[in-house]
Every structure is written in C-alpha cells, then in structure tokens.
Image (tube, coloured by chain):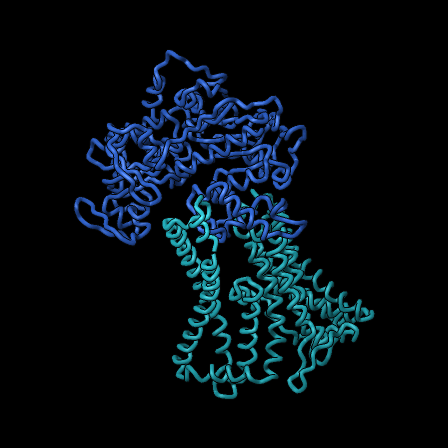
Chain colours: A cyan, B blue
Amino acid sequence: MKKFDKERVLLAVAGPVIALAVAFVLSAIVLLASGKSPVEPYALMFEQIGFSDIQVLVINQASMYYIAALAVAIGFRMNLFNIGVDGQYQLAAMMAAVVGAHVDLPAVIQIPLLLLTAVCTGAFWSGIAGVLKVTRGVSEVVATIMLNAIATSVIAYLWLPDVFGVKVGNNNTTGEMHESGWVPGINMGDAGEIYGLVFLAVLLGIGYWVVLNRTRFGFDLRASGASESAAAASGVDPKRMVLTAMLISGGIAGLAGLPILLGDTHTYSLNFPTGIGFLGIGIALLGRNSPVGIAFAALLWAWLDKASPELDFHGYDKEIAVIMQGLIVLSVVVSYEAVREWGLRRQQRRVGAELAAGHVLGAHNNTTKEVAGR
Amino acid sequence: MKILYGMQKPDEGTIAIDGEKVTFSSPADAIVRGIGMVHQHFMLADNLTVLENVVLGSEKLYGIGAKARRKIKEISDRYGLGVQPDRLVEELGVAARQRVEILKVLYRGATTLILDEPTAVLVPQEVDALFDNLRELKAEGLSVIFISHKLGEVLSVADEITVIRRGTTVGTAVPAETTPKQLAEMMVGSELPTPETAESTVTDRPVISVDKLRLETAGGKALLDDISFTIHAGEVLGIAGVEGNGQTELVDALIGLKGADSGTIALAEEEITSWTTRKRREQGIGYIPEDRHRHGLLLEAPLWENRILGHVTEKPNAKGVWLDPKAAQADTRRIVEAYDVRTPGIDVTAASLSGGNQQKLIVGREMSHKPRFLIAAHPTRGVDVGAQAAIWDHIREARREGLAVLLISADLDELIGLSDTLRVIYNGKLVADADPATITPEELGSAMTGAATGHLEHDENAEPGADTPEIRKSPEAPEDEAR
C-alpha cells in the first residue's frame, strides 16, 4: 500500500511543480520579447527573500491571502465558486472597524467581538447568495459577483460623514478604533512587526483540515463536491449543504482583512488593501484546496508582491510579478487537470496489473495477502 | 470495444479489416473504415425527428432533405427496420430507438456493427425482433459483433462465440456444439450459478408497506400512481417492467430522494413518508442504486471513503460528530475479504475497480449495516457472471435472515429466479402480478408491454413465444404509444 501513498505524494507535487516551471519559463519569454534579461529579475527577487523586513512583509501579506484562499477553497471542495470573497472581506473589515471605533470594551471581549462582527458580516453577505441559490436556483457565481459590486456601494455609503465616515484630509476612514481592539504584533526589531492575527490564519488552516477530514460534516461536504447525486443518495440534504458551505465560506472570508485592520491600520480607509478575495481564488487553485498547499501558495504570492517593487530600481517593471501570477493560474488549471487524468489512468492500469499478478487483498491465500498488505 | 471504435489506443497487437492492418486514433477513423457502434445508452436527441437524428453529424453524405429521407427509407426497407423518418424520437419506445441507432450506423456506411449489450433494455419479444433484424444484416453481407452477458441470446444469434474473461480471450465456441452451461463455465471458469432460490422464507411480518403512493412531475402528470405493496420479512418482491415506466421514481420515493405527492410509506409499524434520506438509511433501509457511478460511489475517492458513503453517521465510521478513519479502514478490509472485492488495497480509487468489484463493495457496505429493507435496483447490471453469482448469494442469504428486498431488474431470469412475489410496473402503475414459480419470461414480457393485466396465470398449452408474432410484425407496438 506504501506504493500508492508515494504515488499520491508524487501526483500532488507534480501539478504545482509543472505549473510553476511553465509559468517561470513563459514569464522569461515575455521578458525576452520585451528585450530584457530573462534571468536578472528572478535573481533580484530571490535576493529579496534574504532581507528580514521583506520576510515580515511577506508573512503579514500571506496571512491575509491564506485566510481568503481558505474561504474560496471551502467552496471549491463542494463545487461552489464563491467569487464574492472580495466583497465579503471588505464589508466585514469595514463593519469591524466601525464597531471597533464605537464600542469600547476590555480587550478580552473587544477582540472576540470584532472577530465575530467580521464573521457574521461575511457570512451574511455570502448567505444572501446561498439563499438565492437554494430557493431560486440563482448561480452563486453570478450572485456573488453582483454582491461584490453592491458591497462597494454599501461601503461608499457607510463612509459618508453623516453615517460612519470620518474625513482625514482627502481620505475616507471610519475613524480610529479604540485601542482595546488592537491586536499586538510580534516585534522583530528593525524588520517591523508580524501581525498577531497571523496565528489566527494558522489556526484556521488547522481547523479547516480537521473539519474536512475528521468530521462527519466534512465528509458530507466533500462527498457533495465529489458527486452531488451520490451525496444526495447517501443522505446529504443538498440545499442545506449549499447554504451551510456558503455561510462558512463567507464567515472565513470576513476574517481575511482583520490581520491588517487590527494589527496595523486600525481604521478602514481608502488605503485598505483591495482585491485579496480575487487573489485568494488563484491561491486556492494553486494550493489544490489543501491547507498546506494553500500556505505555500499564499507565501509565494506574497513574495511576488513584496519582492517585485525592487525591480523598479533596476530598470524592470514590477508588473512582471503580476504577469507571472496570471501565468501561474493559467498553467495550474491546465497542469492539474492533466496530472489528475494521468494519475487516474495510471492507477487503473496498476490495479489491473496487480490483480493480474495475483496481488489481491481478498484472496484466500496467505502469501498473496501479505504482499498486498504491506 | 473502445479500441475497436477508436476511443482508446491498444498498447500491443493489431487490428485488420479485410486483411488490411489499420490503426484508429479516433472514432471518426473507425467510421471511415466501416465500423459502427450501437451504444448501450442511446445517443439520440429526444426533441428531434428520426430523420434529423440520423443525418446529424453526417449532413455531407446525403444532405438533410429528400435525398436523405430516401436513403433512410431504403436502408429501413432493406433490413426490415421499420423506421419512420418523421416521428419525434421522444415518441418512440426503447426498441424503436434502438433500431434508429442501428440505422444511424448503417447510414454512415458501416459494414461492421458493434452492439454493446443491446438486449439489456428490451423485453423478450423485442429481442426476437432485434435478432431478426440482425439476421437480415448478416444475410446482406455485414458483420456484427454482439456483446452480451446473456448466454441464451448469444447462442441463438451468433455464428461464432469468443469468450473474454478479465481482459483476455479464454476460448471460442461454435453455438451449435455448445450448451449454455459449457459457455457459462468458460465465462466463470467454474460451475454455473443460477438465480434460483430454494425454499420460501417469507414470514407474515410486514417490513415495508407502501399505500397509494403517487408522485407527479412539476406539471402534475403522474409518474407513479396508486402504488401499493407490502414486503414481509424474508420476502423478495420483484418489479418487472420496461425501463422508464416509473422504476427509478419508485426507488427515489422509497429512499427519500423524491417526496411523495400523496400516499404513505411505512417501515415496520412506523410511518416514514416524511423522513429524510439519511434517517431512512440510518433506520435500516439499504440501497443498491441503479446507477452505481452516479448514486453509489465517489469514483475518485479511495475505497475506504466509499465504504463510509451513505453511512457516515453510523458505526464504525463515526464516533459522535467525528469520523473514525481507522475503524472505517479496518472495516473496509473486512468487506473486501468477506465479499471478495478484487483490489490490491483499500487506498485505490473506486474508479480503478471493475464494475463487478465496485458492485460487490456496495453490496458489502449495505449489508454491513444490517438493513431491514433492501432496495436492489439492477443489482447485477454490467457485472461479470462470477460477481453476479456472489451478489445473488448475498441477497439470498440476507433474505433467509429476514431481510425484505425490493428487486428491480431488467434481467427477467434474475427476477423470476430470486423473487417470492412478482409485480409488473407499466406507465407508473402496478398493473399485474405473477407467481415466479410458474411464469415464463415470455409471459412476463407481454405484461411488461401493457398487453396483459391482473393476475398472470401460466398457460401450459401455450407455445412459448406463441403470442409474440403480432408484436414482432408491427414495429410500433403498443409500448411505443404509451411512452
């Protein structure tokens, strides 16, 4: 049986490795085509990993990518495409900022309250799409895209001075949050501070794995994603599962903006990072919806983000990193599908071969049983 | 079969047509070489006419108008197919659709026909008609490859038989010199099993009672109407019927995938009409689905996860809300051994097993939870003879221990052999009942087309098949109108 395990690891790694290699090569071709060195930008960006301030930036950024990607991944695991993570986390961050600015409780209550506000806001926003899908059959893809646009408008409304907005120069903010809601970071000296909520990201990753792989609910969710009809026949209520998965996905999405909100900005302003939800889709894809894979993918993405500004100082455009991110997503989709099919066919052939050779688990023969049982 | 039709490439070996070696890289290549395939599942567009379906994709041959119609008529008359080009496919019965499929293949100029389990969906009278068609084709100089697991049919229609077991040729036979028993022994490699059950184990304790069950389409048309039956502990109730007469809906209503529009279902004394699928399964309804790939398995998941499917809340798969993978894996190993599932391990995906082994896993899984009532929809469809015998044994054994079984099958021998009671479903209603001890497949077949209702008595004087010619002669027999 070891053989099949090794095989699975090989298959799991082959997809991303092929995708990354293809993306690097294609980006190099783009560089060549624009008449520049295809190697030097990589060297420059790799060099950046060595600097501790970049490391801190990468970790902080990755924590938010990670949470957003988990939110997307939980949808993917049951064949739901929550494109609305972007709107969900922005709206949730804003609501948390508003609550944080207007409520002042001791930190032990304040911080959980802010987290809960974010979770509920995110879940509420995705829940709208969930309810529409369950009751009216509206595709969650369409509903969540539209809800993203609505979220932008809602945020603009909440920013009005006579609602919750506070003008600081030309910037719209929600006012400074009370200090009891600030989450202290880990001081790394000159390198800066690692957000305290990086640990929340780690916990969410562990929770994600445990729930999916070790609970009945997780099994039902994965079964629904693998085969809707088989899951229904096994006793899963498909509508309830869709709604639950949407709520969980939105709830996690609501947390994606909090590391920076509670750890650094302490207000929701025009400068608040946008687009994390969309990046999360690519990261979840690259990470194959696995908590460990997503962690690597989030770090890779954050590195591309944070190491690329250096390129501007050397006569390269930092948008190379964006091109690369796009190429990675494209090659990931192609290579994963190819590897998956290849793996399935390969396993079928091997099972056939093993059976022909008499390595049968059920055979009434002790010697062959031992062979198979290894 | 896939290789012959160019869907898959051979690793070794050659194919020769008229003595000329050929290689196919796609079905299109195979078609050019005159190979035509009639699939088990028809590939027809329901809302198009026969003519449109036939010309679809080969418009270049004879156009789409009068010329194509003439050609279709010509082929149809030549081989006695009786196809009417202007009818909508959705109005046609299964047998007529199959003839359209055959005509489609001939229209494209096929000289070698591959028929994959063509009789699985037909009643005996229709099978005879199909065989007449095949003999016509043969007489006109065409070759036919007829793939079937029904031995009697192969013996009656073939000129030469090749037996394949586990991917290799185990022998060839000449029908005139071979008995079904010998053929079966070649297929299984041992003695032939029969579906016959020994003594009756029927008790008077009702396990499942269905009363006036009705199920409607969204438009209010009845899919099931006035379905009432009771199955007792130790009883196998067989449902015979041409496919598409409400069997699928009946199973869905019993397992809880579709809610009944009226009527009640009771398990033992308890009414379960409003129960969810999960609760029904937890409370002892076992389910062997008609389509195991769609309803019984997660094809890309390992075997042990498939062992959990459908029983995720029950021991040994779960402790409270937590899964118990270790226990589930250990139990999967037990099932694999006890039910002789041929696999190198429990971590391989379900997709890598053969159909028979997948089915044995499903049967093992369902039996492991000591069901009180088992829904067995086509339990041996598409499985090899060895697995078929094993599955019959398990059903028989469970019946002896007091299991109530609802058996739905297109294999009339299986139905007659395993059932204690037989009912015929036609157009969503249970129209006839029969005693499996005396009824013949031919008599059952005519009830399945709606030609007979009420209690079917075996007529000792009737010649077997004597009532068939009229159905055979009119290609659009009553079953077609009813659909």
Q: Is residue B187 above or below residue B126?
A: below
Question: Residue extending furthest left?
Answer: B19
Question: Residue extending furthest front?
Answer: A366
Could you say where residue B150 lies in the image, as x and y percent from the top left? 36, 32
Q: Is residue B386 above or below residue B124?
A: below
Observer able to see residue B246: no
- Indicate the quadrant containing the N terminus of chain B: top left, top right, bottom left or bottom right: top left
Asked where in the image residue A120 lies, by quadrant, the reply is bottom right
Could you say where residue A304 lies in the image, as x and y percent from the top left? 53, 77
Q: Is residue A30 left or right of residue B346?
A: left
Q: Nearer the viewer, residue B269 or B132?
A: B269
- Indicate the quadrant containing the C terminus of chain B: top left, top right, bottom left or bottom right: top left
Could you say where residue A10 lies in the image, as x and y percent from the top left? 45, 64
Q: Nearer the viewer, residue B417 or A286?
A: B417
Q: Nearer the viewer, residue A11 or A27?
A: A11
Q: Is residue A248 left or right of residue A282?
A: right
Could you say where residue A64 lies in the image, as x and y percent from the top left? 63, 70
Q: Is residue A95 left or right of residue B79?
A: right
Query: Which residue shows up at 33% across the image and 50% down it?
Result: B7
Query: Which residue shows up at 32% across the image and 35% down it?
Result: B186
Q: Is residue B68 left or right of residue B196?
A: left
Query: Which residue shows up at 43% across the image and 82% down it?
Result: A39
Question: Residue extending furthest right?
Answer: A105
How many circles with numbers are drawn on the protein?
0
Q: Nearer the viewer, residue A66 or B238?
A: B238
